[in-house]
Structures are given as structure tokens and as C-alpha cells.
Amino acid sequence: MSRLVYVLNGPNLNLLGKRQPEIYGRETLADVEADCLKAAAALGLQLRFHQSNREYELIDWIHEARETAGGIVINPGAFTHTSIAILDALNAFDGVVIEVHISNVHKREEFRHKSYVSLRADGVMAGFGTQGYTLALQRVARLLDQKT
């Protein structure tokens, strides 16, 4: 199985470090990418890191991952609670899927408690801050190792 992992980030994550730092912290998305690249190298994973505010681009990357990747780590942002289209794309992906949320969505507004992505995810990281991404990569690596 491929050791390529797509790390996909949804809307507003380009503002990480600037938008509501009391909830999401002060790390930027560039900081998250650097941490993920370092963790991936240590775990023997290859990484493709993307962010988009457009649902269709996330879906296109999920489709692309179907052909090349063993795993997807996805923080769908607000699409978590609204996008059946992203769920459908993830359901067509045969590899490992880990959902990441920087904040603990279960301590927040009621509408954030429902995740369509969770219906497909093999695991969910919520409330670990940006460390959730590297923890998710560790889990992907473990699950890929179990499949070989």
C-alpha cells in the first residue's frame, strides 16, 4: 500500500494563527505543514499538503488520492457539518481516513457536533490543537503498517 498521505484543509484554515487564536491557537498553516513534513519523514510517509476554501477542490484532491495515496488526513473546516459531497468522495477512497479538528468541536456550538466526514473516518482527532495533525499521521502510519 502506498505511503503517500494527502493532508487536506478546508475553508478558513488559510487564516490559521490570525482567526480566533483563542480557539485555534497562534500556529499558522505553514507551521502545521512544516510539522507534518517532519513527522511524515520520521514515519516513512510521503506528503501532499493542500488547503482550499472551495469544496470542489477538496473533492478533486480526494479523487486524485484514490489513484496514488494510502491515506488522507482531512480537516474539512465548516464543510464537516454540511458536505455530503465530501463524504461521498471519501466513501470512494479505499485507504485510511483520519478527520482532524483543532478545537474540541463537542465543547462548541451544537451544529458543530454533527460530522458527515466522521461517517467515513477511521478515526477522529479533536481538541488536540495543531498537534492533532501529527497524531493523525502517526495513526495513518500505524494502520498502513498493519495492512502490509
Image (cartoon, rainbow, N blue to C red):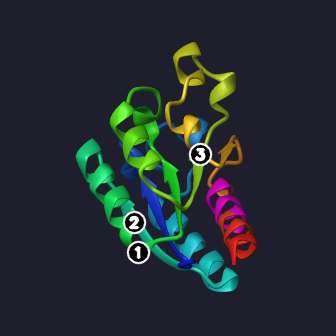
The first of marks 2 and 3 along the sequence is: 2
Q: Is mark 1 on a helix, strand or loop?
A: helix
> Residue 115 magenta-drawn?
no
Q: In which quarter of the image is the N terminus?
A: bottom right
Q: Is residue 54 visible?
A: no
Q: How far apart are marks 3 and 1 (CA)?
A: 18 Å
Q: Name the residue under label 1.
A: 68
| Residue 121, numbered circle | 3
Residue drawn 26% across and 52% down?
Answer: 57
The label shown at residue 65 is 2
Callout 2: SS: helix
- Main secondary structure along the magenta-highlighted residues: helix
Residue 76 in the image: above or below residue 94? above
Which x, y percent locates residue 46?
Answer: 52, 81
Q: What stretch is highlighted in magenta?
A: 132-139
Instruction: Give the residue drawn at x 64%, y 66%.
Output: 137
Label pair 1/2, CB-CB below 8 angstroms: yes
112 over 118 or under it: above or below:
above
